[in-house]
């Protein structure tokens, strides 16, 4: 017990309990809800879907559920621990990611701890109950393995096994493959520029090449087989996803939440000048590529933080060494009873504080849900069953899937890869009243619209005389068509045409999926 309460270990405990508390946040990710429903679908049908069951616009179309194992985990935790279980488990996974980062930071523990906290604040915009949290944890594990001084056959097997797990949890496995490639190229550059002996470089290149090939082979062992190889490329080249989905945008540095990232980017340029050691080419390659990725997409900020933080720790360690020599004798002294009692009090107060804070977050979940999602409008739809099909807001599609499926299907939801660029552009035109915005409403024979009360579509439809509001609050409006839609004589793109009754009869029988319930009841 005395060892645990030593200042350095107490500091470490405070640091990661603090990160855990910061990461314990209410569920606000719009995609969470269709992940939760997909997990339920897989558990209750004991099968991974390969065709869309949730929308009427893509019903029966091929769909790659690449996050299937993450979704099973999410649903299982929900069944066992409800919202509190999800919040606590994913906060713990986030804290574990940064603990591994802390272990990779060489030198003075206080400097390493402060840098890890800095990295945590830089990554906060990406935190939440979402499959990406698992992906970033596995990236942290991979970097910890790759940076260990001794690489053995056991390390190789660990990385291949990690890739196999990663490929079933999330398509972010491609980040792991990219890291292996960068380490391979970086090791070769270290040899060219004289930072390593060629005998060591050749051994490392052989080891990394074998690891890379076996890891690529392991990816195929997933429910989608070899198709998963192409999925990351399709995502990166999707114009609609890059244009319409906020987490794929470049960071908006006018917003305060990205200031820690700005400071970290500047530090990667300034800090090397404080150290007398030359930067290894491999380190420079990793930092530059990950910094470029973070500037391209908010989603990739954690990868930059995981790579840059150990690099920033080296100058800080050099700065602290001289000060550490003068205080080394005092650090070797045993804890007095007074200090032991004081540190014990700090530990108890911190644990109580964390428990109170996390409990408050859990208790606020229903309030947070009602503030973020159209809970009242969904209750209206469930009770009154207005005529379908339903046109819905993109960010609300997942919430509707969780609350209304299988009784109702959505027009669109967060699975942008399923809907494709053309469909996403047409949805955007309707939602933003651009181009021939009424055409999708008529083509799909939309009878009910549910959108935010303040959006332009909610204003223009009642003014047209063809729609009337049947429900409205500060968050959402539900409009029902009062005049028949204009039927389209021809559909130029059959892939976007409404599913006909004949096609519906050819789909698989409706799986038995229970309605959402609170597992505490």
Image: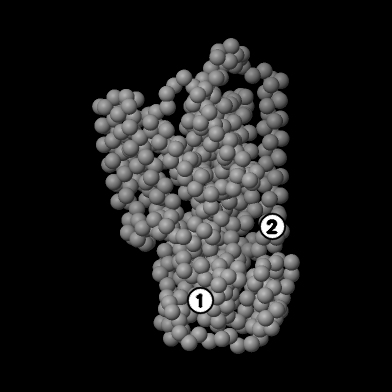
Q: Mark 2 = which residue?
A: 368
In the image, residue 499 above or below residue 296: below
- Front position among marks 1 and 2: 1
Taking depth in this image into account, of 310 and 189 the one nearest to the observer is 189
Q: In the image, what residue occupies the spot 56% across and 59% down?
A: 32
Near mark 1 (Cα within 10 A), the count class, few <14, some 14-19 or many ≥20, is some
Q: Residue at x 66, y 69 (%)?
A: 456
Badge 2 density bin: few <14, some 14–19, many ≥20, Cα 10 Å: some
Q: How many marks?
A: 2
In the image, which disc is placed on residue 13?
none
* In the foreground, 470 or 497: 497
Q: Quadrant of the C terminus?
A: bottom right
Q: Is residue 88 above or below residue 113?
A: below
Report how far apart the C-alphas of labels 1 and 2 lie in the structure.
29 Å
Camera sees residue 77: no
151 relative to 338, above or below: below
Image x and y of residue 304, in percent: 49, 40
Which residue lies at the image location 46% right of the left edge and 60% below the top edge? 239
**Disc nearer the start of the sequence (1/2):** 1
Identify the element where label 1 is drawn. loop
Q: Which residue is mark 1?
A: 56
Residue 414, position in %: x, y? 53, 63
Q: Are marks 1 and 2 in contact (CB under 8 Å)?
A: no
At a point 50% along the width and 44% down the height, the residue shown is 294
């Amino acid at each position: 017990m005395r060892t645990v309460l030593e200042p350095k270990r107490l500091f470490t405990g405070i640091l990661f309990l603090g990160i855990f508390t910061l990461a314990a946040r209410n569920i606000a990710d719009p995609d969470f809800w269709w992940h939760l429903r997909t997990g339920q679908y897989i558990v209750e049908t004991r099968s991974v879907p390969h065709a869309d069951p949730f929308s009427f616009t893509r019903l029966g179309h091929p769909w790659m559920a690449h996050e299937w194992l993450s979704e099973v985990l999410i649903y299982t935790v929900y069944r066992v621990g409800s919202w509190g279980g999800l919040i606590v488990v994913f906060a713990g996974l986030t804290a574990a990611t940064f603990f591994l980062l802390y272990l990779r930071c060489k030198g003075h523990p206080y400097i390493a701890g402060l840098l890890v906290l800095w990295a945590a604040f830089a990554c906060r915009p990406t935190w939440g109950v979402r499959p990406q949290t698992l992906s970033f944890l596995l990236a942290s594990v991979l970097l910890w393995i790759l940076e260990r001084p001794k690489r053995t056959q056991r390390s190789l097997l660990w990385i291949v096994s990690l890739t196999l797990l990663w490929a079933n949890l999330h398509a972010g496995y491609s980040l792991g493959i990219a890291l292996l490639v960068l380490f391979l190229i970086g090791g070769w550059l270290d040899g060219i520029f004289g930072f390593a002996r060629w005998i060591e470089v050749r051994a490392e290149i052989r080891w990394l090449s074998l690891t890379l090939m076996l890891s690529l082979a392991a990816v195929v062992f997933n429910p989608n087989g070899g198709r998963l190889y192409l999925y990351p490329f399709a995502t990166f080249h999707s114009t609609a996803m890059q244009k319409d989905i906020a987490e794929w945008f470049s960071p908006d540095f006018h917003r305060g939440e990205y200031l820690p990232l700005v400071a970290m980017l500047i530090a990667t340029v300034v800090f090397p000048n404080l150290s007398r050691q030359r930067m290894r080419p491999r380190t420079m390659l990793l930092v530059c590529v990950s910094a470029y990725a973070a500037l391209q997409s908010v989603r990739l900020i954690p990868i930059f933080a995981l790579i840059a933080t150990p690099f920033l720790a080296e100058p800080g360690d050099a700065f602290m060494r001289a000060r550490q020599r003068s205080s080394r004798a005092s650090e070797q002294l045993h804890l007095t009873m007074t200090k032991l009692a004081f540190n014990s009090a700090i530990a108890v107060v911190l644990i109580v504080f964390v428990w109170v804070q996390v409990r408050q977050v859990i208790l606020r979940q229903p309030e947070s849900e009602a503030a973020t999602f159209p809970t009242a409008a969904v209750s209206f739809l469930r009770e009154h069953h207005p005529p379908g099909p339903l046109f819905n807001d993109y960010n609300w599609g997942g919430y509707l899937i969780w609350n209304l499926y299988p009784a109702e299907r959505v027009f669109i939801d967060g699975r942008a890869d399923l809907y494709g660029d053309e469909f996403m552009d047409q949805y955007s035109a309707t939602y933003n009243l651009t181009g021939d915005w009424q055409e999708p409403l008529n083509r799909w024979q939309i009878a009910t619209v549910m959108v935010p009360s303040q959006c332009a579509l909610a204003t223009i439809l009642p003014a047209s005389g063809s729609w009337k509001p049947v429900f409205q609050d500060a968050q959402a409006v539900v409009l029902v068509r009062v005049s028949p839609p204009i039927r389209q004589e021809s559909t130029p793109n059959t892939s976007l045409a409404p599913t006909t009754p004949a096609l519906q009869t050819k789909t698989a029988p409706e799986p038995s999926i229970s309605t959402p319930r609170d597992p505490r009841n």
